[in-house]
Amino acid sequence: MPPKYGARAIAVLAAAIVLAYYFFFTWKSLGIFFDRDDMMNLYVAWSKPLGELLLSNVLYWTDSARPLGELWYRTIFFVAGFDPLPFHVALLSLGVVNLALCAWFVKLVSDSARVVAFTAILFAFQTRLMEVWFRTAVIYDALCFTFFYLAACLYLAARKREQNPGPGQSALITASFILALDAKEIAVALPAVLILYELLFHRLRWKNMVLPGILGLLTLPYIAAKTLGAKALTANPYYQPEYSLSRFLERWSEYLGFLFVRPLPVSHRAVAALLILPLLVALLLRSRQLIFAWAILFVTTLPVAFLPYRGGFVLFISWAGWTLFAALLGNQLISLVKDPQHRAFAAAALFILLGWRAGKINLHDQRTGDREWLYGDARVVETLAKQLDALQPEFPRGARFLFAEDGFGTDEWTPVFILRLLNEDATLVVDRVKMMDPKPATQDGYRYVFTYENGKYRRLRP
């Protein structure tokens, strides 16, 4: 077989293995129902005027919360209705797109097919980030990754030709960046990543900094909208930053515990070691690629490093940096093998070893980890949706409902969201006794009355 055809065959085989690995770990997500966050996200997206939703994606600096994710919910609901399967199919499909974007980005940085293969098998799935592939409620992180790395790839592709992006390319990069901001706030790290790329791989010229600088300026009104005013995101206690060394170390200890699949957060000493030692290795090896990979994993974590804990899924964008760093180190080891045939064999062996070892860790953690927060929450929503739909498939518009008991917490609106979405009727009145003060003396005035006992919903009226 001629060398070029042999290389293509190996590349196709490696891509097939990576895709098989990805779907092996993620296909079970297709059977998961909506969870509570899904109901809130979907209801807000569905109830918002379409014109307002579209405009908020253009006017990215408004106080609208992550409008690109809302548009995603709204579009799939319009096409498929109240059915979680199409949402999960779309999420897994987006995962394949993100895997391809990660591979493209790594190829642009490393110019090595081996590094691409090593990165892809590590990036394809990580058990502590599984919400990115299993929970449609965190679609914001998946969408942010898509447009963050699309913008980065378009920029790097132009700069690899020793050219600055032209007007059309610049417009496309800027639009991708704005969509990344529309998806999630962590996208503000992109201008810093591009500036670091320029400093590491190109001569320092002001014209090379124009587009990254413009993207940086675009973040200023966005950051102001998210941090200032009564409707700012930081007004929410769950998003209030604390800029202190203790918060920094606390958050990194949790996140590193996740990335290295530890049962508990790592120590603060381990945080210092796991952040500083890779940088020292990159500097000692004088590898600009390794330094850049370290910069990605560090800089893209900073936006969440001072916030209250939000879950491992917030590391999805930085996960590409971690896997790139590991892949580059692996390639450094492979390059020590002088004979080309032996080097090719060693590369194939390392690719298989990485997949086997990472897969074993992922599989063990999936089997033993307590993820009731994922499966249990979805089952509660599924029970209400399916049982109410079985009790009466359709309700007249504007009907009034009362839940004597419903199995949800006092301050939740999930039953309201489910009934209105099931019937696509925002005029339904849904009252819950546990949320009413004073409690109703009678059930008069309600056409439908339900209660919840022993895991089942029962209709009391009519």
Image (tube, rainbow, N blue to C red):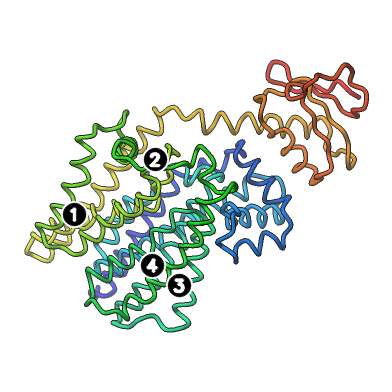
Which of labels 1 and 4 is toward the front? 4
Relative depth, front residue between 435 and 165? 435
Task: Tell me the residue that label 3 is attached to.
Answer: 173
At mark 4, the secondary structure is helix
Give the mark nearest the N terminus, 1 or 4: 4
At mark 3, the secondary structure is helix
The residues tagged by marks 4 and 3 sit, at their Cα atoms, a distance apart of: 8 Å
Q: Are marks 1 and 2 in contact (CB under 8 Å)?
A: no
Among the 4 quarters of the image, the one containing residue 347: bottom left
Task: Tell me the residue that label 1 is attached to.
Answer: 330
Circle 4: residue type = Ala
Give the mark nearest the N terminus, 3 or 1: 3
Which of labels 3 and 1 is toward the front? 3
Please tell me which residue is depicted at 90% across the width and 40% down the height of the picture. Answer: 396
Circle 2: residue type = Glu
Circle 1: residue type = Gly
Which of labels 1 and 2 is toward the front? 2
Circle 3: is it few (<14), some (14-19), or many (20+) Cα within 10 Å? many
The residues tagged by marks 1 and 4 sit, at their Cα atoms, a distance apart of: 24 Å
Task: Tell me the residue that label 4 is attached to.
Answer: 152
Label ID, residue 242? 2
Give the mark nearest the N terminus, 1 or 2: 2
Label ID, residue 458? none
Please tell me which residue is depicted at 48% across the width and 51% down the height of the picture. Answer: 141
The residues tagged by marks 1 and 2 sit, at their Cα atoms, a distance apart of: 37 Å
Quadrant, the N terminus: bottom left
Circle 2: is it few (<14), some (14-19), or many (20+) Cα within 10 Å? few
Q: Position of residue 7 (x, y in %)?
A: 27, 69
The residues tagged by marks 2 and 4 sit, at their Cα atoms, a distance apart of: 29 Å
| 439 sits left or right of 28 in the view | right
Circle 3: residue type = Ile
The residues tagged by marks 3 and 1 sit, at their Cα atoms, a distance apart of: 31 Å
